[in-house]
Image (cartoon, helix red, strand yellow):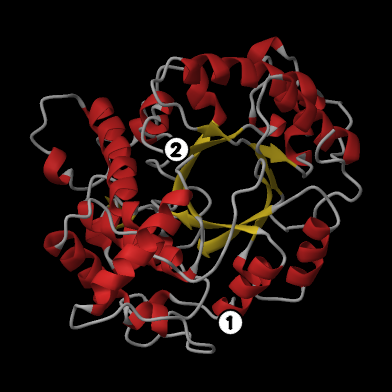
Amino acid sequence: MKNKQLKRILIPVVLLLVISLPFAIPEKSSGDEELFATDHLERQTSIQLLEENTDLKRFVFDSGYQFNYPDAVRGIYVTGHSAGGSRFNTLIDLVNNSDLNAMVIDIKDDHGYITFKPGEDSPFADIGQNYIKDMQEMMKTLEENEIYPIARIVVFKDSVLAQKRPDLSFTENGSVWKNPRGESFVNPFLKEVWDHNVEIAKMAAEMGFQEIQFDYVRFPEGFERRDSELGYSQGEYENSEIDNVQRRVQAVTDFVAYARQELEPYDIDVSVDIFGYSATIPEAPGIGQNFSKISENVDVISSMIYPSHWSNHYFGIPFPDTEPYRLTEEYAKVENEVLSKLENPPVSRPWIQDFEAPWIYHGTGIPVTQYGKAEVEAQIRALQDNGINEYLLWNAGNTYTENVDYTP
């Protein structure tokens, strides 16, 4: 992980330099929700000028909150609705009364909306929703309860931006293309799409989040079957000498590297969610994910290894959802081998399953495996038995199993 001590060394020096400049970095003011959005440009200008006018190699932004990296991140997923509603207190209690210590909170959701109102002057005002009504109060609550905050930003699955800007998406017969679930994606080849998401990430960092977790960092599933059918631009990759498969891999990898570079001044970690099977193959050609290349450009890699999401007989397991320990162990062995070959491997922090998947049992005659205390703990033990001590729990409704031993 990055050396968090660096912040304490550089901040006093930077503050002295700021005093001599004709502007100052705004401090948080209670109840001023628009501060983070309206002063975003000024803060970025401050960063640039400091870099140009001093010998400092790096400016470190200080949000004013104090969060310490836990012994090992053990977190839960929290939607914007939960973070801004009554369920939030229940989830706080869950963390406080267990060995959990982190929350992954939606900041840009699966539709493309921002889960709070960033202010009328913000370039993102039109996509802001009032799910989290008081962001500062939420961050203060997390700080008081020593809960490590991670901002989840869904990147290329973005129906809102796709409908608003079809030129940034994929079209079919003159209309924005939708997958069978009615979802649209924006184009990973285009830097304007990159910047849209990176600027939201910077806003989250300014609010105090200690890590930005990018999700859906990929092309739509099965894109290799639609490559020649959909209308879209390849942007700067148009004249590349590599084939379309490698162009997709290059675009996705380049986005991750670009985002990490842009977020360096905030002294936060960057993580990416990735399909677990991507670690078991050289690369996923349709969606553009190369596990090793993405891992080389992040601080944390979070593979989604839910037992329910693997096909039958993967790793030689007849029905993976029924064997959470074995599935998790087999995956961990593969991932450990892949990461061991990297010069600077990221922290492994997989997503594990705390939900049932009855739809995969239809027609099998196999009773649905109920995911409770035993199944969740089995996944955690399998990770720990293979030297992986960090993990995140996924439940789309944020209803997590009670009385789980999170450090078995």
Within the image, what quadrant is residue 83 found in? bottom right
Rendering coords of residue 300 (x, y %)? 50, 38
Instruction: In the rendered view, tell whether residue 253 sits above or below residue 102.
Output: above
Q: Cα distance, mark 2 to mark 1?
A: 36 Å
Q: Classify residue 12 as left or right of residue 93.
A: left
The amino acid beneath tag 1 is Asp
Identity of the residue drawn at 22% across and 55% down: 56
> Which residue is nearer to you in this view: 2 or 305?
2
The C terminus lies in quadrant:
top right
Observer-side mark, 2 or 1, equals 1
The circle drawn on residue 134 is 1
Rendering coords of residue 223 (x, y %)? 37, 36
Q: Classify residue 289 as left or right of residue 174.
A: right
**Where does label 2 land, which residue?**
221
Instruction: In the rendered view, tell whether residue 164 sits above or below residue 173.
Output: below
Q: Residue furthest left?
A: 239
Secondary structure type for disc 2: loop
Within the image, what quadrant is residue 47 found in? bottom left
> Which residue is nearer to you in this view: 333 or 156?
333
